[in-house]
Every structure is written in C-alpha cells, then in structure tokens.
Image: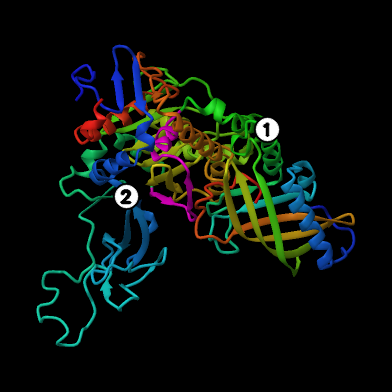
Amino acid sequence: MSRPALAVVARAPTRAEVEDLLFDEAMLLDEWKLEEWFALFAPGARYEVPPANAEEGVDSAVSLFYIADDYERLRYRVDRLQDVNAHAEYPHSRCTRLVSNVRILGPRGDGWAVRCAFVTHRSKADVTDVYAGHHLYILTRVGDDLKIARKTTHLDMSSLRPQGRVSIIV
Amino acid sequence: MLDKTGAQSEPHPWVKDDPTAGRFMVSRKAFVDPAILALERQHVFDRSWLYIGHESELPNPNDYLTRSVGGRELIFNRDRTGKFRAFFNTCPHRGAQVVREAKGNAMGFQCFYHGWAFNNNGAFATKIKDGNYPEDFNSDGCANLVEVGRFESYRGFYFVSYWSGIQSLYDYLADARDFMDCIADQSGVGMEIVEGEQAYSMRANWKLLVENSIDGYHAPTTHATYFDYLVKASGGMADMSVMTNADGSNHRSQGLDLGNGHAVVEGLAPWGRPVANWIPAWGEEGKVEIARIRADLEARLGPDRAERIARKSRNLLIFPNLIINDVMAITVRTFYPESPDYMKVNAWAIAPKDETAKMREWRLFNYLEFLGPGGFATPDDNEALEACHKGYKNLIEAGWNDISKGMLRANPFTDDEHQMRAFWREWAKRTRDVAPVEARV
C-alpha cells in the first residue's frame, strides 16, 4: 500500500483539530454513516483490532488478531455492514461511542501518532455490551485535510466476554 | 440402544432417530434445560478426552500456561526435565488458584495466599518449621499439586480426561486420527499454534456451536456476504474443478461419522488454502510458493494424499467440544458451557512451523476474512446461534429440531446433516440411561 506523497512539510495538527476529527468519527459511526466514515481514511490506510488484552506493537503479520484490514478489505467491511445479510448487525445495533483523553504523541513517518481512550456501548435485542480500551491512530494530511492513515483499536479487557464479537467498528 | 440397522429399539427422551423413515429429531429442551446440562457435565464432559493445548505452546522446559478445561482450572506445563504435565490449578492447602498468569516460564509455582510452593513437577517445596505439622507430613502426597489423572497426546495435540477408566486417547480418537494426520502432516517439521488467542463467548447453548462448526448447509445463506467478498473483493476464487479421490471416486464432498461421536465434513471449497490451493490475491509470488508447498507434500505423502490435503477443506469435530477446521486457514477451537445459554469459546490458529513469513502473513489475513469474532462469517454464526437459542423459548409449542437432511443418501455430502447425527447419536448414548424417569415420555 502506498501512502500519498507529500510535496511539502505538512502542517502539524492541534489537539482541537484532532479532537474534531475523532468526535466526528464517533458520531458518524453512532449514526451508521459508514460511507462518510470510510472517507475519513487516507487511501492505503489500515484498520486493526488485536485480541483483547494484547500489548501495543503486536504485529498482525505474525500474530492472530480479530481484525486486520488493508484498505481494500476495510472498503468491503463497510459494504458488508450496509448489507442486510450482515446478520450480526442486522437490524443495526444502537451504539454510543465516548472518546476521551486525546493526546498527540508526536510525529510518526509522514503523519502524527494520536492516542485516545474510548468506551463504546453497543445495544441490540435487549442486551447492552460495553467495550473499553484505547485507539492508536496515525493521522496524515491529504491536501489540507487531516485523514486516518492507520487505526488500531486496543480492547483493554481480559477477554472478549461477554461481548463475544466485534461486529461493529468499535 | 441402537440395533444393527441403527434404529432405536426404545425411544430416547430427547433424540428421535429413525433411519428407515429418514427422520432425525432433537428436542429443543436439550439446549435449554439446566438439568440436562448437569447430566452433560457428568456423562459427556467428565467421560471424554478434552483438549488442553498443543505441544508447540510449551516449546521449552519450565514453560507453563493456564487453561480452563471442562469446568476445571488447569496448569499445562513442562517440568525441569521437559516432561509435559497437567495439574489442577488449586492449592492443596486451602484451594486458592496457585498460578494466576496466563503463561510464563518458571522452575516452580507459589500460592500467594499462605505461601505454599511447588516444584513444576507438582512436588511440595516449602520448608515448614518443626512442630507445625506431623513429622511425616506429605508422606501421602497431600501437600503436592494434584495431577490430572489421564493426560495423553496425539500428533502434538494434548488432551486430559477426568475419568480414570477411559480408553486410551489413540483408541478414543478412532477414525478421527486420519483427519488429524491430514493437519499434522502439513509440515515435515511440525505444526505450531500461532501467537494470539481469540477468547470470546456466545449467548447460546454449546451444542449449537458443535453443529454449526461442521455444517455445510448454512454457508450460502448465513455467509452470503463472505462469498460475496470472495467473488467481488478478494480477487477471485480457488480452483474448484472436480478431482479424483484416492479410491477412484470423484465426489466433491462428504460428511462422515468417525466413531465415538467424532465427525467430519471434507470437500472442495472456493477459498485459498495456504496448504495448498492458490488464489489470484496471492499473485505470481504466491503461485510459486504454493507449487513448492505442493511438491513438498507430494514428496513426503505421495500424490493422492497431497491432492486431498492441498485441495480439500475439512471441518473436524472431536467429541465433545474440540473443532479443528482446516479451511482458508486452520482454526483450533474449543468451548464449554457456563450455563445452558452461555458458552466460553477459545480459538487459535495453527500453522506449519516452516512456512515462509509471507505465507504466514497470507494465512493470518485469510483466517480473519472468515474466522473469529471480527471476521466476515463468525459473528453471523454467533447471531444465528443466538437466534436459535431465543427461538427455543417456544419449545412447549414448537419443540423439535430437524436434523434429517441427507439421511436416506448412501454417501452424504458436506451440506447434509449426517455428521451432526454422528454427534447426536453419541450424545444420546451418553444421556440415555441417566435421563430422569419423568423425562421418558
């Protein structure tokens, strides 16, 4: 996957700009606006969810994850979640995503590393599950827009119980 | 009891098995009744061989890991001499869990409660001042860790049993051994569990996952979006052309009863197989690598067996709760009911130790396209199982599951239900004589 080439040194984001992006992302997911959510990603982006309790730095090329999508498979994940045959999310679950403790960790490659904590409530058929953890992002500039080049969702839980599935974008 | 034709000579309270009429029914009560779960714990789980782990998970002496197996908390480890062992993870003193880490390497274990310590061969290793206990304390072994009574392995897969009288693991596995061989033989140097565990759960009865794991019938509907992905998004399907089997037949798929409740479905499938069926997504680089793996299989195992291992997928049940599905990757999956409507599931990937880094990456990418709690298929299985379990609330008025598909066919296919009937017949045998009298109506 190739990242877009940057002609000039890109403008570093402020925390407010990063928070705007992450809060927008959470709202789009809560509202199941998945096409608009996918548009937040830079071409060539990756989206990964290591197993619950995994340490940062774990590599999906050598270790078993829950989700390790390249850009093309993430594109299909978005298509699938809008299909009535994605039974696990049909009818759609109701979700509320809380994003907090947003920090810019510093420059990484041609972007910036960002960490935030999250709590996601997913409710379906009288059962409400809670997912808690932290997201690690690499954000990058595409033109002047801040885009997601990489998102890794760490579930800070000892196991995926009783949630049993990551059928939503946590 | 079944007579020589396989027909039941007297009715089972929860399983109706009529091979002549081609009808097989299971009572929905079997999925929801706490009294039946209690019978299962005693007569199914406590009277079977249960999977604890793979030898590759303990590569060195003093390695250990902790596992829940059949409702017990166990330590699976290698002692200082390298010998594989299994202990009940409970202090002989007051019962506290001795090892609370998921895994590690240690010469011994110490209970944090009162400090009792043990060598990793289980022997009590605490010096206690004179006068506290009789001089011959532990001469009967009362202060040692309790070792699991039966502990055996086949081709690197370790099992325990809590029944001292059980037959050897080798005999117990019966015709399932050939299918375990088809997995163990995929590498000349051995298979290994890949780092990373999928520890999840389903809000459904455990037997629904037994059925689902070996069910070819549900795939086109439950997994419509997965096949859509395979055709439209992943770059295309694997070679599905008809093959000639070693016995000269050319059937594409079959479901088999392997004895003792074990069962399998085996057949051609459209996904890529790291061992060894190429898909366009792997490109020319992958084509060369798949050809190399295929040539290695042929050299070691001969052309017929290589063809079968490479091109056919297999979903294998080892009774009662081990699934080894050798599909677009290989998953090793076990599960246990906490209650009739909730099970804990643990799943791992197993792979040839000697595959290339690139093939390992493709394998894990393939695994996640279908398998596990974030895949394009398993979450929908989870939903289906939970939907079944909810449907069983109607069992008073709508009380029976139908598992008859293909019952009158001489050689059932993977999308028939012969393999599920093999599981249920063993389950019926285990529960028949212990079912309460009031249930026999």
Q: Where residue B93 appears, x then y in whole percent? A: 24, 72
Name the residue located 24 percent from the left edge and 31 percent from the top edge: B438
Secondary structure beneath label 2: loop
Q: Chain of mark 1?
A: A
Q: Magenta residues?
A: B189-215
Tag 2: amino acid: Gly
| B240 horizontally vs B280: left or right | left
Q: Which residue in the structure is indicated by mark 1?
A: A83
Q: Quadrant of residue B131?
A: bottom left
Q: Which residue in the structure is indicated by mark 2?
A: B70
Q: Nearer the viewer, residue B5 or A59?
A: B5
Asked if labels 1 and 2 share a chain, the reply is no
Q: Chain of mark 2?
A: B
Secondary structure beneath label 1: loop
Q: Where residue B398 appears, x then y in whole percent? A: 43, 24
Label 1 Cα crowd, 10 Å radius (few <14 / some 14-19 / many 20+)? some
Assess whether residue B212 is covered by the magenta stretch: yes
Q: Nearer the viewer, residue B288 or B4?
A: B4
Image: A42 above or below A78: below
In this view, which residue lies farthest toward the bottom? B130
| A126 horizontally vs B19: left or right | right
Mark 1 and mark 2: span between their CA atoms? 38 Å
